[in-house]
Image (cartoon, helix red, strand yellow):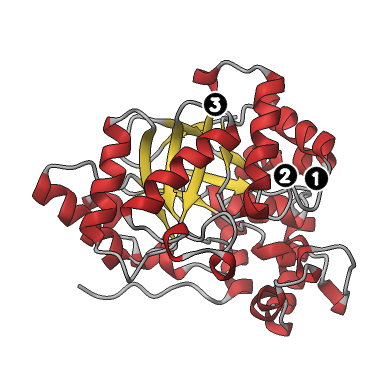
Amino acid sequence: MEYRRLGKSGLRVSELSLGSWLTFGKQIELNTAKELMKTAYDGGVNFFDNAEIYARGESERVMGKILKEMGWSRDSYLVSSKVFFGHQGLQDSKPTQYGLNRKHVIEACEQALTRLQVDYLDLYFCHRPDKETPIEETVWSMHNLITQGKVLYWGTSEWSAQEIMEAHMVARQHNLIGPTMEQPQYNMLHRNKVEVEFAQMYRTVGLGTTIWSPLCSGVLTGKYNGGKQPKGTRMEIEGLEWLKERTANEENIRVAEGLSEIARSINVSLPVMAIAWCLKNSNVSTVILGASKVAQLEENLTAIEAKEKLTDEVLERIEDCLDNKPVHPAF
């Protein structure tokens, strides 16, 4: 395993990390989740990603139980939570149980600590921007959690560059601790935000990125190639119809079929190539993997070595197949 700094911070995070969205407390049994975490940790992974909304809090309870049972030294791993949706979801929550207002940010942190059975969160993300809460209130709340020792670094998820910069402006104005990292979607089919929108921020504020969905929700595994409709995938989960409409469309599948040929030519699987492609971007601090089977995780961890196979020539072939290279604005 190799490690990268989380943006301009001194924190070193493993290039590959393990996330629990749609798996822990939902798709897989406790024993499987435990084996996945052990496999990841033994492979050098030091970051485990979670959120209050994942499986309505059950994902954090499962992860907390496993961390307790494994008995790993607390200074050897990083664990995160995210705040915004509430652990019951927006529709089933009362007005004070969601959002980025001070009350929910503070109480959600306490609840996450209880579920994860830890004394502090290494990373704490604002899961979405909150249009109803002044950014000053959110920045102050995160700063206070850090000064209290309950959070070490705070960041954002699916925020725009403008929203992140507003948070930094508030932090500078009041001498507060600003956001260290952003968690955006990034993969071969979803590139603009990480490659263009955030481009200046890597230099100006030293933005770190903990990217999710490197396989574009399974499309970049090749499982949907040829019009296949496999059962038991996240696309079939109730409530995720939007995911299928956005990702498993004819154009994306056509691209995945072309990418599969390139992967075969360099003797790696398509998912491994897709993950390695994300790692070739030096502005990616860590790639969050999702897995429901140990064998699947073991394969995806080999993306560390597969990076070397993505030569300039191979990357050019990939670009030709994707035909979606973002255009950088002329300054």
| 239 is higher (above) or lower (below) than 311 | below
Q: Is residue 153 left or right of residue 19?
A: left
Residue 19 appears in the rendering: no
Residue located at (70% from left, 38% from top): 62
Q: Is residue 102 left or right of residue 266?
A: left
What is the secondary structure assignment of the residue under circle 1? Answer: helix
Residue under numbered circle 3: 77
Which quadrant of the view contains residue 44?
Answer: top right
Of 132 and 1, the residue lying toward us:
132
Of 154 and 59, the residue lying toward us:
59
Residue under numbered circle 2: 300
Residue located at (29% from left, 54% from top): 138
Frontmost of labels 3 and 1 is 3
Quadrant in which the C terminus is drawn: bottom left
Q: Which mark is residue 135?
A: none
Q: Position of residue 90 (x, y in %)?
A: 54, 67
Q: Are marks 2 and 3 in contact (CB under 8 Å)?
A: no
Hey, what amino acid is under mark 3? Tyr
Mark 2 vs mark 3, CA separation in Å: 20 Å
Residue located at (54% from left, 26% from top): 77
Q: Position of residue 278 (x, y in %)?
A: 55, 53
| 195 is higher (above) or lower (below) than 2 | below
Hey, what amino acid is under mark 1? Gln
Hey, what amino acid is under mark 2? Asn
Mark 3 vs mark 1, CA separation in Å: 22 Å
Q: Are marks 3 and 1 in contact (CB under 8 Å)?
A: no
Q: Position of residue 220 (x, y in %)?
A: 71, 63
Q: Are marks 1 and 2 in contact (CB under 8 Å)?
A: yes
What is the secondary structure assignment of the residue under circle 2? Answer: helix
Residue under numbered circle 1: 296
Q: Residue furthest bottom?
A: 250
Who comes first in sequence, dot 2 or dot 3? 3
